[in-house]
Image: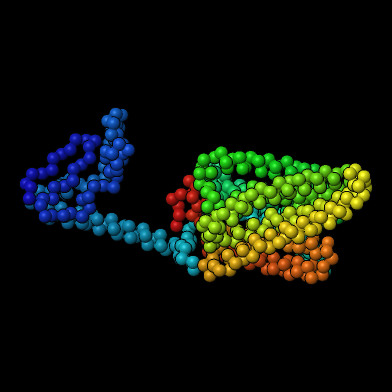
Amino acid sequence: MSSSRLVEQPQGFRPSLPDTGPGIHIDGAATPESYKFDTDGSTTPEYYGASTHGANTPNPPPQDWPDRSKHELTSTNSSQVALNLSAHKHSLSIDEEKQKAAAAAAMMPNEKGHIRDKNITFRERISHVTWAWFTTSMSTGGLALVLGVTPNQFNGLQTIGKTLFISNIFLFILITVGISARFAICPQALRNSLLDGHEGLFMPCFFLTISTMISNTQIYLVPGVEEFLETVMRDIFWIYVAFTLTLAVLFYWFIWTTPEINQKLHADKMGPGWMLPIFPIMLSGTLSQVIAAKQPPQDALPIVVAGIAFQGLGWFVASCLSTIWIYRLFRTGPLLVNVRPAMFMLVGPPSFTALALIGNAKALPENYAYFEAHPMAKEILVVVATWAAIFLWALAFWFFLIAVVACVTVIPKMSFAVPWWAFVFPNVGFTVATINIGKELQSGPILWLSTVMTIFLVIMWFFVAGAQIRAIHLQLVLYPGRDEDAHQPQVHGHHV
């Protein structure tokens, strides 16, 4: 063994490793973790604040190294030093085990293998309310709309629909307060949510919820207060069109010109969420057919024209994106198991376009302007719209069947994710389109089919709502690392 003591190092330099002599190994004598490589390849102790360039180096802080009097090695005390270091390490191990045990006491696994944290606060959980949560109120409002127009009504169904509509207003306010609290708690979360190529695409769901609330207002509230709300609904329609058209332009431009987003979007990984920014303006066609029917001719005609125009815009853009979606299916197959219900979103564009064509044709004013000069024009347009709607219905049915097969084949592997609400909202359009076609063809079987579809829609709403409540309880959602914000900077590093 070496008989010399370790040489005292100048202040500000890394202490040398102990000279253990030949054949002797001491645990913990490896290079400390804090010695890391700089960009130029040299090593620098991070806790010294030293620079490899040698300039402006601050005085070193006190180091947490073992007492030299106990841990310097000589030829005569190596065994004692080894015992001291071993005892020190054992003490640290005991402390670590106590900390792990305390943490484990506050955690318990749920049935999906995730860890449930008993100590997580309400503030922490509300910090994970994402834009995707508006799919909850969007789908609830859509169900209320279906109940208001479905055939084969029974006593009390309109009351149920109105109750659901009013409840959805409170649900929308609750989610809005929740996401506002998230942004208040962590201001950078707003920017990060919009720059996130996953969560950001759900932001238009906020406007889709507003669309359903406007439609339900016309269906459930206006019949009793026509004179008061006639002008209000007209103005609301034009305000909605202005906002959603702006959204459709600027949001896509934002995606195309923001590297943080578009560099992560690849055609072979395309998701149905790419269509969401165009959906709000597309649904102006759904709004126009509800509102224009209750407006005077001079207001109804511009509303119908705008509704058809922007419905066509939305359908065309969605159709272009559908080709990318089919390309993705050929390249990489369907979506991941938990979010596979989002495949039902492809049902939406042809379905809502089909119902908008028929509804707007029937809402056209008679004997006014163009239709005064062409008395048969409205009747002809209703016929054309009906058969065009049947044409589009078949496309929606094809997308519906593909989504059903994709989900049925993985049922045992699925666990809840917020995009499960795609089980409901796109099929709202599919159901209402079926209702409109059945009414125009005066077909009892088609109308009964739409009634069956309505029943299944109600069942799916209860199923998804129950799964969401259960997921909240099991901390599968509203938890760090388990929501659409999982990869955002303010959440990174807090995964369980």
Give the quadrant of residue 26. Answer: bottom left
Residue 114 or residue 373, whichever sits in front: 373
Picture quarter with the C terminus: bottom left
Residue 221 or residue 288, whichever sits in front: 288
The residue drawn where x is 73% and y is 62% is 431
The residue drawn where x is 37% and y is 60% is 100
User: How many numbered dots are placed on residues in this image?
Assistant: 0
The residue drawn where x is 59% and y is 54% is 325
Residue 97 drawn at (x, y percent): 33, 60
Residue 253 drawn at (x, y percent): 61, 40
Instruction: Decide if residue 6 is on the left or right side of residue 451.
Output: left
Does residue 243 lie above or below 87 as drawn? above
Residue 419 or residue 272, whichever sits in front: 272
For residue 327, say whether it is visible.
Answer: yes
Does residue 439 lie above or below 40 as drawn? below
For residue 187, say whether it is visible.
Answer: no
Instruction: Decide if residue 271 is on the left or right side of residue 384.
Output: left
Give the quadrant of residue 457. Answer: bottom right
Instruction: Decide if residue 267 is on the left or right side of residue 69.
Output: right
Q: According to the image, what is the colour scheme of the structure?
A: rainbow
Residue 215 or residue 165, whichever sits in front: 215
Residue 360 drawn at (x, y percent): 81, 52
Residue 227 drawn at (x, y percent): 88, 48
Considering every residue shown, the one lying at the far top of the view is 55
